[in-house]
């Protein structure tokens, strides 16, 4: 996750030993471990609360529609049909704004 190699880990441990000293280091490690566990528990509980809200599977598309790339074409086909219908009205002598 953080790409911490053995040399980086050794430097961090030496710095922690210098900052906190040998007597305080076990207490700091224990507090850090508890904080990490509490954070993991909170993340797990949060993800469990969010997960049931998602549908188990994708809903089935309405009749006449298929999934995938063709669903992206459907609006284009609808516009083309609407334009073709408008052209049919114009050829009959009626404009698109005139009543039928």
Image (tube, grey):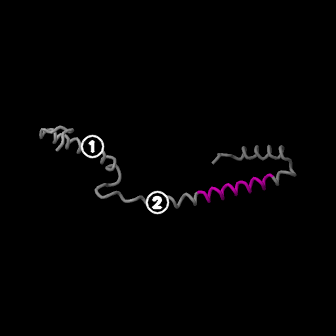
Residue at the (85%, 51%) spot, across then down: 24
Magenta-colored stretch includes residue 58: no
Residue matched to label 1: 79
Furthest-right residue in this view: 23
Q: Position of residue 88 (x, y in %)?
A: 16, 42
Query: Which badge, 2 or 1, comes first in the chain's sequence?
Result: 2
What are the residue bounds of the magenta stretch? 28-46
User: Magenta stretch mostly in which secondary structure?
Assistant: helix
Q: Secondary structure at mark 2?
A: loop
Residue at point 74%, 57% (across, down): 34
- Residue 82 occupies quadrant: top left
Left or right: residue 55 compared with residue 48: left
Element class at badge 1? helix
The location of residue 31, given as percent across then percent down, is 77, 54
Q: Position of residue 8 (x, y in %)?
A: 72, 44
The CA distance from mark 2 to mark 1 is 31 Å
């Amino acid at each position: 996750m953080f790409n911490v190699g053995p040399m980086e880990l050794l430097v961090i441990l030496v710095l922690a030993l210098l900052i906190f000293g040998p007597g305080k280091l076990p207490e700091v490690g224990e507090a850090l471990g508890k904080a990490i566990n509490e954070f993991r528990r909170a993340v797990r509980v949060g993800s469990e609360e969010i997960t049931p809200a998602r549908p188990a599977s994708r809903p089935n598309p309405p009749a006449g529609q298929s999934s995938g790339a063709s669903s992206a074409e459907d609006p284009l086909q609808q516009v083309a049909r609407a334009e073709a219908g408008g052209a049919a009205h114009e050829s009959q002598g009626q404009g698109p704004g005139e009543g039928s």
